[in-house]
């Protein structure tokens, strides 16, 4: 497995080994020991899968408290996946990593706790999976506006299909700091 450290500490891209032949393929999407050896030593407590059509944008979501780390992957189709550091006091606060994930390359991205996460579907449909380090808690959920001009994320789309909840997300600078996660020096 190849591991790529992105420009944001803790945001990792995994390129698992894929074994294929005329019958199809096999790949390991999670092995706690192998991923720990590669730098991701976490415990996942919840798995989620969503199916979305082209142009759907989900995000940018976070939880505080009970921040979730997420290991994400496109099982079918292709998405533009985004992680944004929203940890108050972080030297990379407001910075993002943008990666294409698809069923063609089997890449995964790990988004650490304290980051907002979102994705936009580029293919006709996408089946998207994510493993979470904390359980979903609706009382802790928050969102950052997908097209916040201060973040400067190029989603490659002007008018995505958003949930009613995501339409109400605010710019990062408009969210009270007590509602955001805090940066902790390791």
Image (tube, helix red, strand yellow):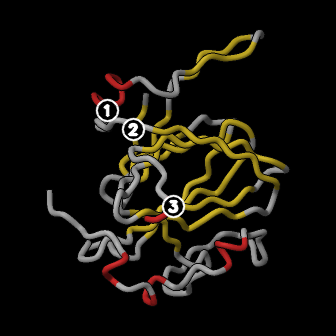
Find numbered disc 2 in the image and state the secondary structure of the residue it sits on.
Answer: strand
Direction front: furthest residue: 139
Quarter holding the C terminus?
bottom left
Drawn side of residue 66 relative to residue 57, left or right: left
Mark before the other along the chain sequence, 1 or 3: 1
Coordinates of residue 131 in the picture (x, y in percent): 49, 40
- Nearest to viewer (mark 3 / mark 2): 3
Where is mark 2, residue-wise?
Answer: 3
Report, in whole angstroms, how far the alpha carbon at label 3 lies from the one at label 2: 32 Å
Report, in whole angstroms, how far the alpha carbon at label 1 lies from the one at label 2: 7 Å
What's the mark number on residue 138? 3
Find numbered disc 1 in the image and state the secondary structure of the residue it sits on.
Answer: loop
Q: Around disc 3, counting alpha carbons within 10 Å, would you say few (fewer than 14), some (14 to 19), or many (20 or more)?
A: few
Q: Residue at x 32, y 22 (%)?
A: 33
What's the mark number on residue 38? 1
Coordinates of residue 90 in the picture (x, y in percent): 26, 72
Drawn side of residue 127 relative to residue 26, left or right: right
Drawn side of residue 163 relative to residue 168, left or right: right
């Amino acid at each position: 497995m190849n591991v790529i450290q992105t420009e944001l500490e803790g945001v990792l891209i995994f390129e698992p080994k894929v074994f294929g032949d005329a019958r199809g393929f096999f790949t390991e999407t999670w092995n706690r020991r192998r991923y720990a050896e590669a730098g991701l030593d976490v415990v996942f407590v919840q798995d989620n899968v969503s199916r979305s059509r082209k142009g759907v944008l989900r995000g940018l979501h976070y939880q505080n408290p009970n921040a979730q780390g997420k290991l994400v992957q496109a099982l079918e189709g292709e998405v533009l996946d985004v992680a944004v550091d929203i940890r108050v006091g972080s030297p990379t606060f407001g910075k993002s990593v943008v990666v294409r994930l698809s069923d063609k390359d089997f890449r995964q991205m790990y988004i650490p706790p304290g980051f907002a996460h979102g994705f936009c579907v580029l293919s006709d449909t996408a089946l998207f999976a994510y493993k979470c380090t904390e359980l979903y808690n609706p009382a802790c959920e928050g969102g950052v506006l997908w097209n916040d001009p201060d973040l400067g994320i190029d989603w490659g789309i002007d008018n995505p299909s958003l949930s009613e909840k995501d339409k109400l997300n605010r710019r990062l600078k408009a969210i009270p700091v007590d509602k955001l996660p805090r940066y902790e020096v390791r």
